[in-house]
Image: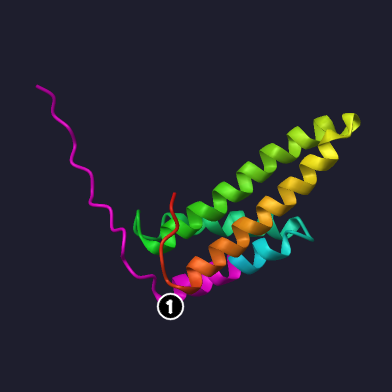
């Protein structure tokens, strides 16, 4: 027989407070600008990592912070892969696909955020 520590319930539909919504809006703007100025994404991911612990796990704000963080870290990974492949010219195409993917993630995230819904993570 095993004894498991009970986990806190996951609040999947907890509404984000006004201050949480403002922080998320700012981070979405930073990520949107990062399609043209990468340094804004670094500021956004720093805010995400700081604020993730302040919001209820599984809530609306938490899901958006996770969505943004995953976008950032996957973009970093695939940017390195594209950089390695650039001498073979396929990396250039990879960067285009990566840019489109980031734009999609931003547009989808901001649209779901505007509806007040949680992101699938």
> For the stretch drawn in magenta, what is the main secondary structure?
loop
Is 56 inside the magenta-drawn segment?
no
**Helix, strand, or loop for circle 1?**
helix
Residue extent of the magenta highlight: 1-27
Q: How many marks?
A: 1
Residue in front for this viewpoint, 54 or 111: 111
Question: Horizontally, is 16 left or right of 83 in the view?
Answer: left
* Residue of label 1: 18
Label 1 crowd (10 A; few <14 / some 14-19 / many >=20): few
Pinpoint residue 27: horizontal percent, then vertical percent. Answer: 59, 65
Q: Quadrant of residue 17?
A: bottom left
| Left or right: 54 as drawn, with respect to 107 | left
Q: Quadrant of residue 7?
A: top left
Residue 112 at x, y = what percent?
49, 66
Q: Nearer the viewer, residue 91 or 47?
A: 91
Q: Residue at horizontal 74%, vertical 33%?
A: 81
The answer to whether residue 11 is magenta is yes
Q: Residue at x 56, y 50 (%)?
A: 69
When the figure is inspected, residue 100 is found, relative to residue 93, above or below; the finding is: below
User: Above or below — where is 20 with respect to 97?
Assistant: below
Name the residue: 51% across, 53% down: 67
Query: What colouring does the structure picture have?
Result: rainbow
Q: Is residue 39 left or right of residue 61?
A: right
Question: Quadrant of the rendered structure where residue 90 is?
Answer: top right
């Amino acid at each position: 027989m095993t004894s498991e520590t009970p986990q806190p319930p996951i609040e999947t539909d907890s509404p984000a407070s006004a201050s949480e919504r403002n922080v998320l809006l700012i981070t979405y703007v930073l990520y949107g600008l990062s399609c043209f100025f990468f340094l804004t994404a670094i500021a956004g991911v720093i805010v995400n990592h700081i604020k993730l612990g302040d919001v209820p796990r599984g809530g609306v704000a938490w899901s958006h912070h996770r969505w943004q963080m995953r976008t950032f870290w996957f973009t970093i990974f695939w940017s390195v892969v594209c950089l390695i492949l650039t001498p073979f010219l396929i990396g250039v195409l990879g960067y285009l696909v990566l840019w489109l993917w980031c734009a999609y993630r931003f547009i989808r995230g901001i649209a779901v955020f505007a509806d007040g819904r949680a992101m699938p993570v």
